[in-house]
Image (cartoon, rainbow, N blue to C red):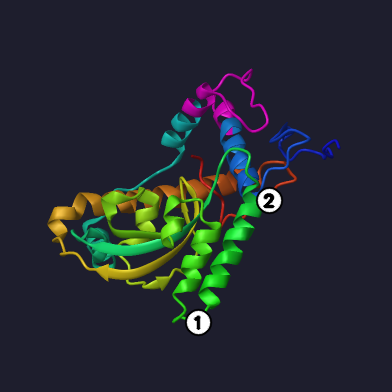
Amino acid sequence: MQAQESTPASVNGVNLHAAREQPGVEELRQRACTELLRQAAMAEGLLDPADTATDGVISEVASAAIESLLSRALTLPEPAEDACRRYYAAHAARYSTGERVRVRHILFAVTPGVDVTALRGRAEACLIDVRSCDRNDRDAFAASAAKLSNCPSGQQGGDLGWLAAGDCAPEFARELFGRAEVGVLPRLVHSRFGLHVVEVLQREPGASRPFDDVRDAVATALRQQAYVTALRQYLRVLAGGARLTGVELDPAVTPLVQ
């Protein structure tokens, strides 16, 4: 049976995918943002007009041109001392040392060719299921891990044991450390490996580090926040002047170019 063809989504007439391809909403938004920036780089003379994108995939030259464009277009103020201190006071736990968490998880792995939309649906259904179980029914999470998890830990009920921040991927660690949550997290945790349903079983707090020792790290976090805000605003301006077909870019949730 042949796949049904549909009109591809596009930005100013440039297709974001092949007619037979049906990217998910997030993937489509990502491609649209990238294409907006590619065309902006071309308009600024940073990229040869002959450069082309194929079904949402841009060239290495275009990627470099986009980096140059953003370095020009985004104004990023240096974080002020008082802003750094306020951020540190609100997130001091993130800058402690020796913090450990005992965790178990159910991994829904993202592998080549997987239907990410369907995978997310299964992960969200699992999350709802384990969160709705009686809190005293500790076997429910373990049973779901054994049945559904794509991680070998599933055979141990998903138990990963005690972890320090350096023991796991940074994007996974950001969801676990410097927080007070215990129990099944109310959200899916995204990592380079896929989608995780996570339960924090225990926490051991770390020792606080003084502001002067972590000021550079705090300033870096604030610079990253400023970059995200500036990029979203810039993409909003670009989208406002573009002809978008088959894709909507909500300024509040516009994905970033990776």
Visible in this render: residue 186?
A: no
For residue 136, side relative to residue 79 (left or right):
right
Q: Quadrant of residue 172?
A: bottom left
For residue 196, side relative to residue 162 (left or right):
right
For residue 23, side relative to residue 126 (left or right):
right
Neighbours of disc 2 within 10 Å: few (<14), some (14-19), many (20+)? some
What secondary structure is found at the residue carrying circle 2? loop
Q: How many labels does the image show?
A: 2
42 inside magenta stretch: yes
* Residue type at numbered disc 1: Asp
Residue 94: x percent and y percent? 27, 61
Q: Is residue 188 or residue 138 the one in the foreground?
A: 138
| Residue at x 55%, y 60% (from the top left corner) | 147
Q: Name the residue under label 2.
A: 248
Neighbours of disc 1 within 10 Å: few (<14), some (14-19), many (20+)? few
209 inside magenta stretch: no
